[in-house]
Amino acid sequence: MPERALGADDVPSIITYGTNGFWTGAQIGLATGYLATGNDYESREWRKLVFGAGVGALSGVGIGITLGIVDAGARPPAMGWLILRDTGYGVGLGSLVGLATGALFMLDSPDTKYLVRGVAIGTLAGAALGVVAGVIQGISTDDDAAPASKSAFSWRLGVAGVADSDALLPALEGTF
């Protein structure tokens, strides 16, 4: 498939990195702030939500602009852009999965806190998964790598045993 030439509009601006980082960080911070509230939400705990969203948004801007600066001059899609994009996608998917999981927990109890707690936990888990997915995709699509090293990248999911225990845990194994 022929590769098309990239125009100026195809390369994301450093400001776009910062804006995407702002929104993703605010969502992660809000989820963290909610999890920092007590079992029974009290009226004064709104400060934890605002603080979490604010710190998350400001951190997200800093991380986004830093990724944009690091990616400057790289061919799109660059590693930082993939990490930022997939983190945002992970936040969205994680919040939906968390909402569905919270709804399942509501079958035994009509308490709606399960919904919000599920969204918060799903948001954080989805963000972490998005970072991992972005790094993996960035490594596997690295245009500067030699063809031999591209084929050397592999990863697989599996199950691993815990020493001195019968417990089995999910495992991720990879070579880079």
Image (spheres, rainbow, N blue to C red):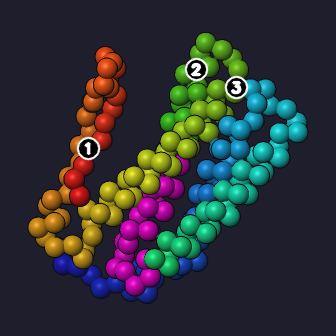
Q: Is residue 12 visible?
A: no
The residues colored magenta run 71-94
The quadrant where residue 111 appears: top right
The residue sitting at 55% across, 69% down in the picture is 64
* Crowd class of label 2 (few under 14; some 14 to 19; many from 20; radius 10 Å): some
The residue sitting at 44% across, 54% down in the picture is 131
Disc number for residue 49: none
Q: Is residue 89 left or right of residue 29?
A: left
Q: Rounded to the nearest whole Å, what is the CA distance between mark 3 and mark 1? A: 38 Å
Name the outermost residue toward the front. 164
Q: Could you tell me the amino acid type at mark 1?
A: Glu
* Crowd class of label 1 (few under 14; some 14 to 19; many from 20; radius 10 Å): few
Label 1: element kind? strand
The quadrant where residue 159 appears: top left
Residue corresponding to mark 1 = 173
Residue 167 versus residue 46: which sits nearer the camera? 167
Disc number for residue 105: 2
**Mark 3 vs mark 1: which is more N-terminal?**
3
Q: Could you tell me the amino acid type at mark 3?
A: Thr
Q: Could you tell me the amino acid type at mark 2?
A: Phe
Residue corresponding to mark 3 = 112
Q: Rounded to the nearest whole Å, what is the CA distance between mark 1 and mark 2? A: 32 Å
Q: Position of residue 118 (x, y in %)?
A: 59, 32
Label 3: element kind? loop
